[in-house]
Amino acid sequence: MANPTKRQQQANLLRVFRKVHRLTGAFLFVFFFFIAITGLLLGWKKHSGNLLLARTQKGSSANLKDWLPLDSLHQRACQYLHDSVSANLSLELERIDIRKDKGVVKFVFEEGFWGLQLDGVTGRLLQIDRRRSDFIEKIHDGSILDLYFGVTGGEIKLVYTTIMGLALLVFTVTGFWLWYGPKRMRRRSIEY
């Protein structure tokens, strides 16, 4: 015969895990929804037909000795951005991405998620695109809130990713126990 006290303790533990699982899910549902959708989009970005991420163009040479100096390429990228998109855009860079094997340098600007690809040798503009995948990534990791509120240290992203990571851990543990706990209780009641 099963020990009624032990069985009651296991049932109480299952109730607690079910409640934690349910409340966490209800509270963080919207965030999990956005993480799931943006994660799917980011996984497909290179296979989106240039909708989310533009294909890297091909420059003249992969030999860095032939390339223009980086500051010259940067000046050209800024000029192309103002001439082709808007003279009112900030020239603040988010990053510079050098694709030596393709002979291309990409300048990604902070404002508006604009990306410009230049030929490393000639400085010729190869492509201007809206980097939708960068925007999606900022939604995915919560840094969009840092951008929106003007927080430069990434504190909101840190708090967001910590909460979501811990929530996923809680979901994993409670979900496993909600699956395994009843099986364990049934097995123990058969044993006694």
Image (cartoon, helix red, strand yellow):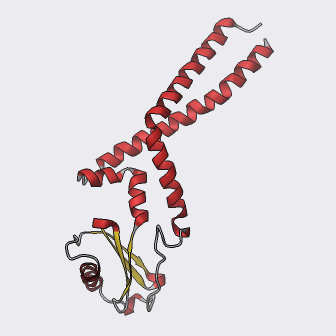
In the image, taking residue 99 as reference, residue 152 lies left or right, namely left
Percent across and percent down for residue 34 are: 46, 48
Does any portion of residue 110 appear in the rendered image? no
Q: Is residue 178 above or below residue 69?
A: above
Q: Nearer the viewer, residue 171 or 85?
A: 85
Percent across and percent down for residue 71 are: 26, 82
Percent across and percent down for residue 142 are: 37, 50
Percent across and percent down for residue 112 are: 30, 66
Q: Is residue 145 above or below residue 166?
A: below
Residue at left offset 38%, top offset 56%: 138
Q: Quadrant of residue 152?
A: bottom left
User: How many numbered marks are there?
Assistant: 0
The quadrant in which the C terminus is found is top right
In the image, taking residue 64 as reference, residue 112 lies left or right, namely left
The quadrant in which the N terminus is found is top right
Q: Is residue 129 above or below residue 120?
A: above
Q: Residue furthest left?
A: 88
Residue at left offset 46%, top offset 70%: 53
Q: Quadrant of residue 75?
A: bottom left
In the image, taking residue 61 as reference, residue 83 lies left or right, namely left
Q: Is residue 86 above or below residue 168?
A: below
Residue at left offset 50%, top offset 60%: 42
Does any portion of residue 63 appear in the rendered image? yes
